[in-house]
Image: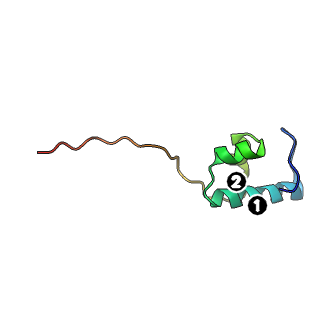
Amino acid sequence: MAEPLKKGARVTGPQRNKLAADLRKKYDGGRSIRSIAEETGRSYGFVHRLLSESGVSLRSRGGATRSKKKVAS
């Protein structure tokens, strides 16, 4: 991004398209929505919405999963 956005500033038109492309590049590179939001100073919801609007296929939630322990017979 060329210039940092002020928190809560409305982003429209070509500036919104450029921001969406920048965010998409970071997300496709493996960054999480939360880390992108923190870096850009925008909310999680804003970043999520912009990625969705730009047609990104969002990854499923990460984190540890619980499974039953197998009992040896």
Residue density around tag 1, few if under 14, some if 14–19, many if 20 or more, within 10 Å: some
Residue designated by label 1: 21
Asked if residue 32 lies left or right of residue 13, the reply is left
Q: Which of 48 and 6 is in front in this view?
A: 6
Q: Quadrant of residue 13?
A: bottom right
Kindly identify the residue that appears in the image at 26 percent across and 41 percent down.
69
Q: In which quarter of the image is residue 67?
A: top left
Q: Which secondary structure, mark 1?
A: helix
Q: Quadrant of residue 25?
A: bottom right
Q: Which secondary structure, mark 2?
A: helix
Earlier sequence position, callout 2 versus callout 1? 1
Q: In which quarter of the image is the N terminus?
A: bottom right
Q: At label 1, which amino acid type do we have?
A: Ala
The image position of residue 53, as x and y in percent, is 72, 54
Residue designated by label 2: 51
The image position of residue 56, as x and y in percent, is 65, 58
Kindly identify the residue that appears in the image at 52 percent across and 46 percent down.
61
Residue density around tag 2, few if under 14, some if 14–19, many if 20 or more, within 10 Å: many
Asked if residue 7 lies left or right of residue 32, the reply is right
The image position of residue 64, as x and y in percent, is 44, 43
Q: Which of 32 and 11 is in front in this view?
A: 32
Q: In which quarter of the image is the C terminus?
A: top left
Q: In this view, does 36 lie above or below 2?
A: above
